[in-house]
Image (cartoon, rainbow, N blue to C red):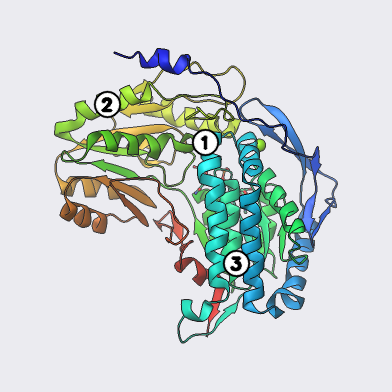
Amino acid sequence: MVDLKDFTENYAPAPEGVEHVKLKDSYHLFINGEFQKPTSGKTMTTINPATEEKLAEVAFADEQDVNAAVKSARDAYTNIWSKLPQKERGKYIYRIARAIQERSREFAIIESLDGGKPIRESRDVDIPLAAAHFFYNAGWADKLEYAFPGRKANALGVAGQIIPWNFPLLMAAWKIAPALACGNTVVLKPAETTPLTALKLAELFQDIDLPPGVVNIVTGDGSTGSNLVSHPDVNKVAFTGSTAVGKSIKKTLAGTSKRYTLELGGKAAHIIFEDAALDQAVEGIVNGIFFNQGHVCCAGSRLYVQEGIQDELLAKLKSRMESLIIGDPLDKNTDIGAINSKNQLDKIQELTFSGKDQGGEIYQSDSCSLPEKGYWFHPTLITNVSQSHRVVQEEIFGPVLAIQSFRTVEEAIEKANNTPYGLSGGVWTDKGAKLFKITKKIRAGVMWANTFNKFDPASPFGGYKESGVGREGGLHGLYPYVELI
Ligand code: NAI
Ligand code: MG
C-alpha cells in the first residue's frame, strides 16, 4: 500500500515564479483616476501571512479622504458615467474583464502573497471568476430593458462598497461589476490585510482609460468603512464581512433612504446520506471546509452523516486528509495555505479549543509539518459534539469541521436549520426525490446537491436569517443597484 505521509513529504516543490510581479513599496489612495496621498499622511503595512514579511505600505484613508472619494464618484456619475450610452459603459466593463484575463498570472500571485491562499486557488478560482463577473455584468449593461421588462431601470448614483479578505479581487468584482453595469459609480474599501489586488485593479483602470472617478479605492480600517457607510452622498451600501459589523451597518442605515445589501457569515450543513457516493462526498467535504483554509462564508463547517455510514465515512475522510499538502501558498502542489492573519488564527484556535472544553474530540491530520514562520492551522475534525456547542453554532472561518450523525431525513433538516445562519448547504444522496425534498426545506440561500462550493456569475448568492440581506450575482444581483420605474 502507498504510504500517503511519505508521498506528501516527498513531493518535489513546484513554486510559482514571482520575478515578473511588480509591487511598489507604497500605495496611495485611488481617487479621481489618480493615486493620491492620504491627507493624514498615515499608512498601514500589509504582510504576507505565510512568511510574516512586509509586502508594502498602504495609505490609511480618514474622513477627509473618504469625502474626497465620494465627491469624485459623484462628479463622475453626474458629468460622465450617467451621460454615456449604456453600450459604451458595457464596453468599458468588457475591457476590464479582458485586462484581468491578460494579467491573470500577476493577479493570482499577488492574491496568494497578500492573503495566503494557495496559488492553485487564486489561479483557478479567484481570478477567472473575477473576470467572469465583469464579463457577465458587461453583458447586462446595454440590456437592462430585458432584465426588467416593461420597467425603466435608473441608476442609484454612488455606491459605497466594503469587502473582506477571503476573496479580495473576486469580492471587488462582485461589487464593482453590477454597480457599473447599472450605471452607478463606486467607492470601494478593501480589507486591511489584503488591499493589493484592489490597488492593482486601480492601475488596470488607469491602463484601460476608465474615466476618472468612476471607481475610487480607499484603503483603511473599520473607521474608513464606517465613514463610507455614513456619508450622506452615498446612495447604496454593499457590505461583505462579519455579522457583527453587518448589524452595526444596518443600525446606521435604519431610517435613511440608502439602499443596502449585506452578505454576512454562515455555518453551512453538509448532509451525507447512506445512499451517497461516498468517495465523491469525501472530496466534496474536503473541498467544502479545507478549500481556502475554510476562509469561506459558505464553507461546509458542519457535517451531518447518516448513522449507518459514519465509521466508514470518517475513515475515508481521515485517510484523504493524510494526503493534503499544507505549506507555501505559491507552490502549485499546495492544498492548504496560510491563515490570513494572526487575529484570525487566534479566533480559530480559541473556537477549536472551546470545542474540546465542551467535551468534543479533536482529530488533526499530521501529514505535513507546518512552516515555522507565518500563520498555520492543521485541518481539523471535531466529533462528539452536540447542537448547542459553540463549534456547531458559531462561524469559525477556518479549516475545522464539526461532525454529528443523524438517523432520519427530518432529523437532518432540523439540525441543519438549527443555527442563526442560513447562507448555504450541501446534500449528498443517490435519490433525486430526497434531494428536492431536503433542499426545499433547508433555509439557506444556496444549496448544492452532490457537489459543493461551485460558483457562477449567473447564480444569485446570499443568505437568510443572520447571513444577510439581499442577493448578489445573476439577474437578482442587479436589483440592488437600480431604481425601477
Ligand atoms: P470585518 O467584518 O471586521 O471586516 C470586513 C470589512 O469590513 C473590512 O474591510 C473592514 O475594514 C470593514 N469594517 C470593519 N468594521 C467596519 C465598520 N464598523 N463599518 C464599516 N466597515 C467596517 O471582519 P473581520 O474582523 O476581518 O473578520 C471577523 C470574522 O468575520 C471572521 O472571523 C469571519 O467569521 C467573519 N467574516 C465573514 C466574511 C464573509 O465572507 N461573510 C468575510 C470576512 C470575515
Ligand atoms: Mg496581506
Q: Find residue 123 and report its image quarter.
A: top right
For residue 157, say whether it is visible.
Answer: no
Q: Which residue is rendered at x = 59% and y = 62% of the image? A: 177
- Provide the secondary structure element on which disc 2 rests: helix
Q: Which residue is rendered at x = 40% and y = 46% of the image? A: 453
For residue 61, say whether it is visible.
Answer: yes
For marks 2 and 3, give the CA distance: 45 Å
Question: Residue beneath label 3, please?
Answer: 179
Dot 1 surroundings within 10 Å: few (below 14), some, or many (20 or more)?
many
Q: Which mark is residue 120?
A: 1
Residue 356 left/right relative to 49? left
Relative to 442, does residue 395 appear above or below in the rendering?
Answer: above
What amino acid type should be assigned to the residue bearing mark 2?
Answer: Lys
Of residues 262 and 253, the one drawn nearer to the viewer in this rendering = 262
Whole-percent x, y for residue 153 in the image:
55, 80
For marks 1 and 3, give the CA distance: 29 Å
- Answer with mark 1 or mark 3, whichever residue precedes in sequence: 1
Quarter holding the N terminus is top left
For marks 2 and 1, give the CA distance: 24 Å
